[in-house]
Image (spheres, rainbow, N blue to C red):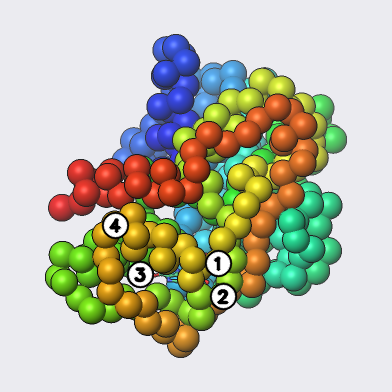
Amino acid sequence: MVGSAIVRRLESEGFNNLLTRDHSQLDLANESAVAKFFAEERPTIVIVAAAKVGGIKANDDFPVEFLLENLQIQNNVIRSAYENDVRKLLFLGSSCIYPKFAPQPIPETALLSGPLEPTNEAYAIAKIAGMKLCQAYWHEFGRHFISAMPTNLYGPNDNFDLETSHVLAALIRKAHEAKVRKDQKLTVWGTGKPRREFLHVDDLSSACLLLLEKYDSPEIINVGCGEDISIRKLSELICDVVGFDGELAWDTSKPDGTPRKLLDVTKLRALGWKPAIPLRDGIARTYEWFRANSV
Ligand code: GFB
């Protein structure tokens, strides 16, 4: 989802010198394959958007894969970038790197100030290791490897699998299928009380370009829209956009995760960036994409 959005953005800006490989062409967890790719292609700028990602359940069920695969991917890519003299590298982390009970909105300084949310601890530890590796290359070798921490993302090419997806994609699918089946109710995980901040992936890609052009610091920088919404309100909004008018039921056997995750985006705003896609429009566009692309 993130990689394809960044490619769309770069192509629309006229870049015709992009080096991309999909998973079937290059396994980023394979150290020697990554080293060979970098040595042959010699990229000047690298964006590390590839990662093993998933929603709250996938993170909770597969901590080994989330920790190992992410460490492998980022270690291979970041080290190869160093060895092949990449001029600038952007590593994408996640807002889940911050402590479960971080102050809200969460400033970058909250990093490592308290315990993590247990459902995504493995993923968060991997992402923290990735940004620390970028900082280490900056401090030890003067490399301009920067790290951005995006909030919860959604948009075209999201994963709509109900077991492994994030909440927004899951609810689009659930509401659509409930509408088609003419169900009376739709079941949402948890209590509906947690609050999340959602950013359309096309807004993330515009922020990434701006950071590559204007941001030059080893300190992490948050990327978010600056507003959050409860899962209950999000569910109602999605049902409204999709056109499902049944009732919501709550499956409280499923975890809520962190109670609130709203990023402080003061640093990013100071660079002159703001999001362009309001949540309702973004959901409508993503629903259109889902209908056009789901089998
Ligand atoms: O999006 P989500 O899976 O991830 O869940 P997190 C957000 C909230 O939505 C949780 C609730 O409180 C879920 O219980 N929810 C309600 C649902 N219905 C559903 C549903 O059908 N599917 C899903 N998936 N959730 C992830 C982390 O945390 O956020 C990752 O696990 C990553 O590591 C990502 O950082 C951005 O926001 O809780």
Q: Position of residue 154 (x, y in %)?
A: 45, 49
At 15% across and 64% down in the image, what residue appears?
180
- Which of marks 2 and 1 precedes in the sequence? 2
* Residue extending farthest bottom: 253
At 72% across and 35% down in the image, what residue appears?
269
Label 4, on which residue? 242
How crowded pointer 2 is (Cα within 10 Å; few <14, some 14-19, many 20+) is rated as some
Label 2, on which residue? 193
At 47% across and 86% down in the image, what residue appears?
252
Q: Nearer the viewer, residue 263 or 94?
A: 263
Label 4 SS: helix
Q: Which mark is residue 230?
A: 1
Label 2 SS: loop
How crowded pointer 1 is (Cα within 10 Å; few <14, some 14-19, many 20+) is rated as some
Q: Which mark is residue 163?
A: 3
Give the Cα separation between the discs numbered 1 and 2.
6 Å
